[in-house]
Image (tube, helix red, strand yellow):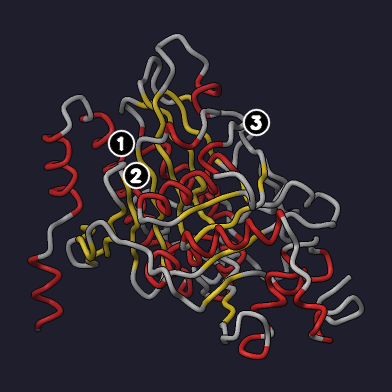
Amino acid sequence: MRADHLLITTPSLSSVLHRWGNDHPGRESLVDVVQAIVEAGARLASVVAINPLRTALAEQPPESWTLGGLPRTEPLPDPATPLPDPATNASGDEQKPLDLYGEKLFVEALAGLDVAAVCSEETEDPIPVTRGGSLVVALDPVDGSSNIDTNGPIGTIFAVLPALGPQADPAAALLQPGRQQLAAGIIVFGPATVLALTVGDGTDLYVLDPRSRDFRLLRRQITLPADSREYAINASNARHWGPGVSEYIGDLVSGALGPRERDFNMRWLASLVGEAYRILVRGGVFLYPADSRPGYADGRIRLVYEANPIGFLCEQAGGAATNGITPILDLEPTELHQRVPLVFGSRTKVDRVRRYLLEPQTAHERFPLFATRGLFRN
């Protein structure tokens, strides 16, 4: 009963946004857009939640799904029927039908609002919405869709930026540096559907009440813990890392016996939204560096609709986000689907990674596991 009571009395997102809008005249359109995105995220959560009951979800075209939140009741296809070749999105990644459904859901939710265009991971060019709109939206509709089949964490990443004028090219507005963002958020579909949101006034955390379908405030203006012992990186790529990253991770793995003289825990969810939410709650650091593999020299994370929103959330929570050296929000995008290396989390840890990259350490040479011919060295 007590948890139930807390969910009922905790302020709803709409009430928080309404009060913020009253305190910031002229931001009514921004409030409407954020509200529409979050409401669409709640509807998408209902589709994600019933995914295990529809084993064909990940294989069916998005046209077979309604926008009411639940799929139509249709007979499953003959298992012997060959599946179509998988499509790829604008970034070259394999698309799941849920990716396309999510994009359609968010774009339709923004129809008629003060939004000139949407930049989505799933589409090469900006999607026009309302001619002369004063805002643009950058969106990854379903981040981590490779986790769908295993019920791993997936979610939505979004950012809202100002348009550059009624006659301006929306693509130019979407290529503004991340510091021009007006709002950013992530929605994570996990055991609970949670939202991290900033409108430039700190980062707040919300949880979706499944009965009312309202997001309700959990924590206001969070601060990232400064002294976490967790880090996230895909260690299977260790042989491809360059100097600095190898040394930094080597010192963490060597733990209390190494130069850091303390033990650390590694996490890797293969879900950017899942990693970001964990770091917002528990601190630590996330690294997806550039490496020597073909196509990874400039990193893997998309700047406009992944790194920038997460960088905004982190900075508003007292943390930091960089490409290893330069703050993410200071980078000026040159193309909609541009990739960057990404390091984010507690500020002291992000700063330490920067020092390792600028001046690779040599302390690891004392530890055979990370020496020149060790397990984690090229």
The N terminus - image quarter: bottom left
In the image, 360 versus 176, the foreground residue is: 360
View extreme (right): residue? 373
* Image coordinates for residue 69, horizontal then vertical, percent: 35, 56
The quadrant of the image that shows the C terminus is: bottom right
> In terms of image quadrants, where is residue 132?
top left
Q: Nearer the viewer, residue 377 or 114?
A: 377
Residue 363, placed above or below residue 211? below
Marking on residue 335: 3
Q: Residue furthest top?
A: 167
Which numbered disc flags the more N-terminal residue, 1 or 3? 1
The percent coordinates of residue 342 (x first, y second) are 61, 53
| Disc 2 crowd, CA 10 A, few/some/many (<14, 14-19, 20+) | many
The residue that disc 2 covers is 37
Question: Is disc 2 placed on a helix, strand or loop?
Answer: helix
Closer to the camera, 18 or 246?
246
Say which residue label 1 marks.
Answer: 33
Element carrying mark 1: helix
- In the drawing, does residue 235 fall left or right of residue 10? right
Q: CA distance from mark 1 to mark 3?
A: 24 Å
The residue lying toward the viewer, choosing from 373 and 18, is 373
Q: Earlier in the sequence, mark 2 or mark 3?
A: 2
Q: Residue at x 74, y 67 (%)?
A: 361
Q: Is residue 218 left or right of residue 69?
A: left
